């Protein structure tokens, strides 16, 4: 852990801090890099500077952190995300900058100097960006590296912080077959919990995972533990701590967790072995891909210690009893692809190309073309570290029509869970994707639909719907003058206070989806 000049920070909110998410918590595709602080289900709570410093970065986006401020001071950068608005001085500068560039989105250093003392109001909390309810996302980063650090390493001075006298919850040990293996007489993965008993019978090679999470006093939310230690016969075999993260490797959370347990059950299972493609720097000790084994007739004692940052711990022990294989050996052969090499696979009309390092570890992959118009890439790996190329045919009815085509990822319920726009070439389309599963090609010929304009609390709002590829860009003009239209949760939003609307003005608004379909609406001001 780096050392910094201060050991306290000012609370980033003017209310007692209650957390709905903590540092290092497992999220889909990343570890959480800050603290999510509840705001009582409302927006507009004053957000306070956690330190004395200056604004180094302003971000305005329809995704990610939404409206966010970055404050530098004494070696730290503190980040305040999902805001509803900024300090008036920042808002005034930003409005001028957006109108000059005719661009609502912004990400960079401000063109003026904005300095604040610790405890000053720098903005107000909101629900902007990829947020699913009003809250403040608060981060502390090393100013030089921009690596996020656990904010609870500092004492937050203000209206109080949730106490944490509750130990983490240990839920179970997962025993994962690693070859010809039986666990409790079966060839499936096995989840042991203390309710099952004091031991587990294992025969053959296996890996282990630990299922656990943390809680805070009086809060319903589950959080990530600060660390896990695992001992086998009193020898440390795994230790990791959530003190700091690196954005360049943060997505490797998919290699840290058992991805099948996460995708199928939303269960947080921490692997005790490190996949070759896992670049995370959170481990003090962990195993490699060499599986564990207990010889028939032998035993091994496994002890798990789960801890939170204040020092509360939970422990559990289970005895692993070596057994002999009793079931018929599975003779099915699966050729593992070397994750270090490039691979090209084809089956029927589907083809994929995986670049070197796309997989986190060696894995078997099967392609399926069932002639129904859907195509599958099947692998226990579930997803990749970097994108690979998939190529499939365009449906016969749409081949050569020139209509925009979209490759769709299809979930188990038949719903679209990912889209990639691609051009047809010789009756085929290709896209770079990072997930395995089922795919199909669909046309996207329907333009976005803009709803009727509404005036809500000083803001002009228009709902926008798109049936497939999603909204790519938008624009609005009043008597030809560009309007500062933002995007909030499926709606275009213009603050009437900008002052460019005049009686009788003609307003034109456009929205374009990812394949280029254009929807528009025209109306006059004021609304009738």
Image: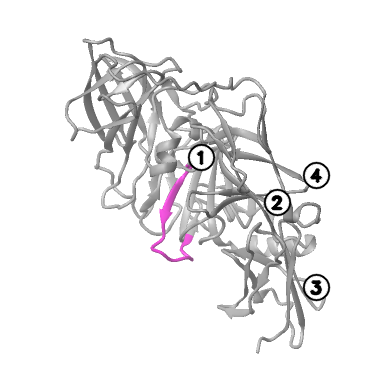
The residue lying toward the viewer, choosing from 388 and 401, is 401
Kindly tell me whether residue 55 is visible in this rendering: no
Kindly tell me whether residue 182 is visible in this rendering: yes
In the drawing, what numbered circle is on residue 30? 1
Separation of marks 3 and 1 at Cα, in angstroms: 41 Å
**Of pointers 4 and 1, the one earlier in the residue sequence:** 1
> On the image, numbered disc 2 is attached to which residue?
395
Query: In what element is the residue under mark 2?
Result: loop
Separation of marks 2 and 1 at Cα, in angstroms: 35 Å
- Residue located at (67% from left, 23% from top): 342
- Magenta part of the chain: 32-46
Crowd band around label 1 with a 10 angstrom C-alpha radius: few (<14), some (14–19), many (20+): some
Residue 280 x %, y %: 51, 28
Is the residue under label 1 in contact with that under label 2 (CB below 8 Å)?
no
Query: In what element is the residue under mark 4?
Result: loop
The residue most toward the bottom is 528
Is the residue under label 2 in contact with that under label 4 (CB below 8 Å)?
no
Name the image quarter holding the C terminus: bottom right
> On the image, numbered disc 3 is attached to which residue?
481
The residue lying toward the viewer, choosing from 526 and 186, is 186
Query: Mark 2, mark 3: which one is toward the viewer?
Result: 2
Query: Mark 4, mark 1: which one is toward the viewer?
Result: 4
Separation of marks 4 and 1 at Cα, in angstroms: 35 Å
In the drawing, what numbered circle is on residue 425? 4
Residue 45 among magenta residues: yes
Query: In what element is the residue under mark 3?
Result: strand
Residue 378 x %, y %: 54, 35
Query: Mark 2, mark 1: which one is toward the viewer?
Result: 2
Crowd band around label 2 with a 10 angstrom C-alpha radius: few (<14), some (14–19), many (20+): some
Relative to 408, 133 lies left or right? left
């Amino acid at each position: 852990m780096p050392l910094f000049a201060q050991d306290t920070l000012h609370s980033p909110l003017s209310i007692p801090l209650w957390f709905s998410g903590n540092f290092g918590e497992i999220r889909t595709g990343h570890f959480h890099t800050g603290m999510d602080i509840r705001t009582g289900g409302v927006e507009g709570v004053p957000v306070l500077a956690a330190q004395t410093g200056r604004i180094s970065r302003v971000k305005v986006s329809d995704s990610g952190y939404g409206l966010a401020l970055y404050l530098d001071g004494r070696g730290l950068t503190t980040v305040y995300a999902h805001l509803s608005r900024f300090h008036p001085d920042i808002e005034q500068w930003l409005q001028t900058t957006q109108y000059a560039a005719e661009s609502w989105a912004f990400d960079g250093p401000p063109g003026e100097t904005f300095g604040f003392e610790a405890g000053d109001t720098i903005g107000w909390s909101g629900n902007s960006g990829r947020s699913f309810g009003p809250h403040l996302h608060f981060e502390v980063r090393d100013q030089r590296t921009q690596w996020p650090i656990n904010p609870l390493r500092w004492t937050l001075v203000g209206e109080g912080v949730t106490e944490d006298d509750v130990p983490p919850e240990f839920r179970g040990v997962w025993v994962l077959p690693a070859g010809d293996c039986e666990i409790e007489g079966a060839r499936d993965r096995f989840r042991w919990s203390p309710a099952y008993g004091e031991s587990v019978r294992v025969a053959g090679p296996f890996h282990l995972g630990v299922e656990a999470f943390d809680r805070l006093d009086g809060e319903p939310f589950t959080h990530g533990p600060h660390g896990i230690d695992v001992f086998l016969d009193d020898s440390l075999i795994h230790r990791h701590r959530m003190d700091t993260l690196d954005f360049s490797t943060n997505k490797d959370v998919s290699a840290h967790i058992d991805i099948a347990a996460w995708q199928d059950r939303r269960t947080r299972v921490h692997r005790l072995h490190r996949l070759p493609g896992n670049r995370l720097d959170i481990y003090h000790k962990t195993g490699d891909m060499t599986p564990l084994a207990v010889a028939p007739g032998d035993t091994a004692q496994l002890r798990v210690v789960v801890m939170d940052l204040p020092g509360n711990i939970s422990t559990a022990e289970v005895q692993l009893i070596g057994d002999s294989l009793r079931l018929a050996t599975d003779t099915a052969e699966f050729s593992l692809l070397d994750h270090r090499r490039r691979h090209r696979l084809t089956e029927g009309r589907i083809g994929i190309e995986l670049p070197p390092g796309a997989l986190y570890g060696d894995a078997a992959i099967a392609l399926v073309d069932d002639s129904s118009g859907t195509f599958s890439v099947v692998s226990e790996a579930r997803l990749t570290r970097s994108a690979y190329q998939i190529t499939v045919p365009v449906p016969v009815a749409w081949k050569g029509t020139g209509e925009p085509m979209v490759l769709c990822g299809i979930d188990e319920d038949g719903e679209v869970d990912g889209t990639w726009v691609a051009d047809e070439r010789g009756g085929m389309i290709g896209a770079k994707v990072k997930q395995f599963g089922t795919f199909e090609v669909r046309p996207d010929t329907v333009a976005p639909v803009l709803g009727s304009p509404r005036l809500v609390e000083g803001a002009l709002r228009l709902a926008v719907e798109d049936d497939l590829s999603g909204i790519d860009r938008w624009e609005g003009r009043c008597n030809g003058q560009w309007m500062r239209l933002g995007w909030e949760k499926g709606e275009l939003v213009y603050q009437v206070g900008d002052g460019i609307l005049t009686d009788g003005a003609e307003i034109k608004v456009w929205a374009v989806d990812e394949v280029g379909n254009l929807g528009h609406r025209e109306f006059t001001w004021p609304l009738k």
